[in-house]
Amino acid sequence: MWIMKLGLDIKGAHITQAGEVVALPTAGELLTEMSKGLLLCDLVSLLEGVFVGTLNPRPKVLQEAMHNINKALAVRPGNNCSQQ
């Protein structure tokens, strides 16, 4: 899975120190991680090289997850300044 080779931590995925993928997350685990918005924020932060701002590390309600997702979507390509 390409996203794991970027070094992002995904629940249910296991990679050896040599970079070999030995276990993939289930669709349910991936859906759960994506719905929190944290994986999207990690991906945007890595690809754009910016800090996306303060996030809700364990969103319990939809509004907290949407806060995380909106932080990631607020980053514009080429914007090198941090988001508050």
Image: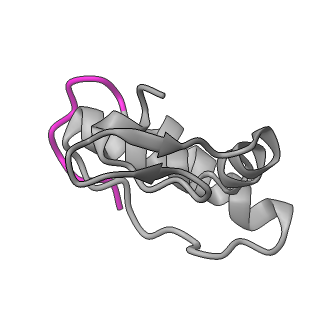
Q: Who's the residue at 56% across and 74% down the image?
A: 57
Q: Is residue 4 left or right of residue 79?
A: right
Residue 1 in percent (x, y) is at 48, 28
Residue 75 in percent (x, y) is at 38, 37
| Front residue (pair 29, 42) | 29
Q: Who's the residue at 74% across and 49% down the image?
A: 35
Q: Is residue 14 left or right of residue 84?
A: right
Does residue 14 belong to the magenta stretch?
Answer: no
Residue 26 in percent (x, y) is at 74, 43
Seen as rendered, the residue at the extreme left is 80
Q: What range is drawn magenta here?
A: 76-84
Q: Quarter of the image holding residue 17?
A: bottom left
Q: Quarter of the image holding residue 78?
A: top left
Q: Who's the residue at 30% across and 37% down the image?
A: 6
Residue 75 lies, with reference to residue 37, above or below; the image says above
| Front residue (pair 70, 2) | 2
Q: Is residue 80 left or right of residue 52?
A: left
Quadrant where the C terminus sits is bottom left
Residue 81 in percent (x, y) is at 17, 46
What colour scheme has been applied to the protein in the rendered image?
Answer: one colour
| Front residue (pair 33, 15) | 15
